[in-house]
Image (spheres, rainbow, N blue to C red):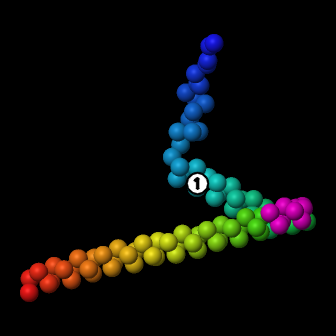
Amino acid sequence: MMTLEPDEAINVDFAEPRQKRDKDRVACFLHLRDLVYLHRQAASPSTIAFVRTLEAAVIAEKAAREKRLAAAREREAERRREAERRTHEGKD
């Protein structure tokens, strides 16, 4: 059985950095959102509902990510304070 190897040109999209793909997805969503909100008469109710639901999910995920980052920063600050405390105890 013979299998064909994928063409390198086809894999270009897969080779893009994740950050670029994420930015492209965000830009696409923002464009869709703007179109729906600016031209409501052309958008179906289900499209409007979909955009609102997706927007709410994005906002919730951003809040959750910020909360996780704040908790991680607090843990790191606590580790540094503890290390500093140990350092000062060793000098006494």
User: For residue 55, what is the image quadrant?
Assistant: bottom right
Residue furthest out toward the bottom: 92
Q: Residue at x 30, y 75 (%)?
A: 79
Q: Is residue 43 magenta?
A: yes
Q: Residue at x 39, y 78 (%)?
A: 74
Q: Residue at x 53, y 43 (%)?
A: 16
Position of residue 24 relative to residue 74, above or below, is: above
Residue 88: % across, % down = 15, 83
In this picture, residue 82 sits left or right of residue 22: left
Residue nearest the observer in this picture, 62 or 34 = 62
Q: Which residues are magenta?
A: 42-50
Amino acid beneath label 1: Asp
Q: Is residue 39 visible?
A: no
Q: Secondary structure at mark 1?
A: helix
Residue 19: % across, % down = 52, 53
In this picture, residue 76 sits left or right of residue 16: left
Instruction: Estimate how packed mark 1 is, as few (under 14), some (14 to 19) or many (20 or more) residues with alpha carbons within 10 Å.
Output: few
In this picture, residue 63 sits left or right of residue 55: left
User: For residue 77, what is the image quadrant?
Assistant: bottom left
Q: Is residue 41 magenta?
A: no
Circle 1 sits on which residue?
A: 22
In this picture, residue 91 sits left or right of residue 64: left
Residue nearest the observer in this picture, 86 or 48 = 86
